[in-house]
Image (cartoon, helix red, strand yellow):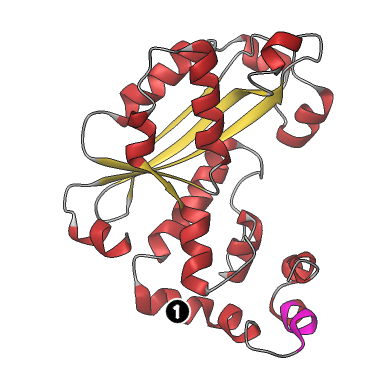
Amino acid sequence: MDTEMKGNHGMKHVVVDLEMNPVDREQREIRQRMREEVIEFGAVRLGDDFQKEDTFQCYVKPEYGAIKKHITRLTSITQAMVDTGDVFVPSFQAFVDWVGEEPTMIYSWSMSDIKQLKTECRVKLPAFDLAWLDRRWVDLQQQFDDRLGLHNSLALKHALGAMDKNFEGTQHTALDDAINTSAILALMQDDAKFKKTMQPVLDILQPKDVASSIGDLCPELLKLSEEL
């Protein structure tokens, strides 16, 4: 995939992140088909040189329940913020229009975001051709893990910590998450730089005391040791 992308001049690269809100429990029929709704789109577009060209952000008003308190605590998104936005269909269409017709790959950290979009489109926009998403989507988390030979998926903040890079902005803010993820995508295009940057992580994958090695590398990675 990486070699293909590097050689494909003119290809755009969009990194996207979504924030979601649970569907109300009272909406039993809808909950059988969809457990969450998108409440924020955040995306950054990179050119074929993997330099940032543009960003996209919008709040989305949920149709099957108000913003839950724990979602506001996690994302800082309030009901008042989404009340100023459109509902899903025009918001998603605005994202599709922003992506445009140029050859574009779309990346997310894990596949949860494309699964959410496909589920929500089936419920709210059944005429939309889901192949539009399938043809473009890349699981960057899986590519990152495969490149390092990891058998466990690294959370975004752990991957940034492994790169010795601080998270810029606020976690669980869609645009900030997308921008930080795009930094990982850009790094992955230079094999030599990627290997040099990630060498401390490669070192801890060698058989030895994984927990203490991870702790020495980055305190944020300590939690990961419980999963290895």
Tell me how many marks there are: 1
Which residue reaches farthest bottom? 208
Which residue reaches farthest left? 9
Q: What stretch is highlighted in magenta?
A: 209-214
Residue at coordinates 65% horizontally, 43% vertically from top-left? 170
The answer, for residue 65, to whether it is visible in the render is: no
Q: Relative to 116, is 146 above or below?
A: below
Rendered-image quadrant of the C terminus: bottom right
Residue 39 at x, y = what percent? 61, 23
Rendered-image quadrant of the N terminus: bottom left
Give the amino acid type for the residue marked by disc 1 in the picture: Lys
Local packing at callout 1 (Cα closer than 10 Å; few below 14, some 14-19, many 20+) is: some
What secondary structure is the stretch in magenta mostly built from? helix
In terms of secondary structure, where does tag 1 sit? helix
Q: Name the residue under label 1.
A: 195
Give the camera-side residue of 157 and 106.
Answer: 106
Residue 145 at x, y = what percent? 53, 65
Left or right: 102 in relation to 143: left
Give the camera-side residue of 13 and 141.
Answer: 141
The answer, for residue 30, to whether it is visible in the render is: yes
Left or right: 206 in relation to 87: right
Residue at coordinates 67% horizontally, 24% vertically from top-left? 36
Q: Relative to 187, is 61 above or below?
A: above
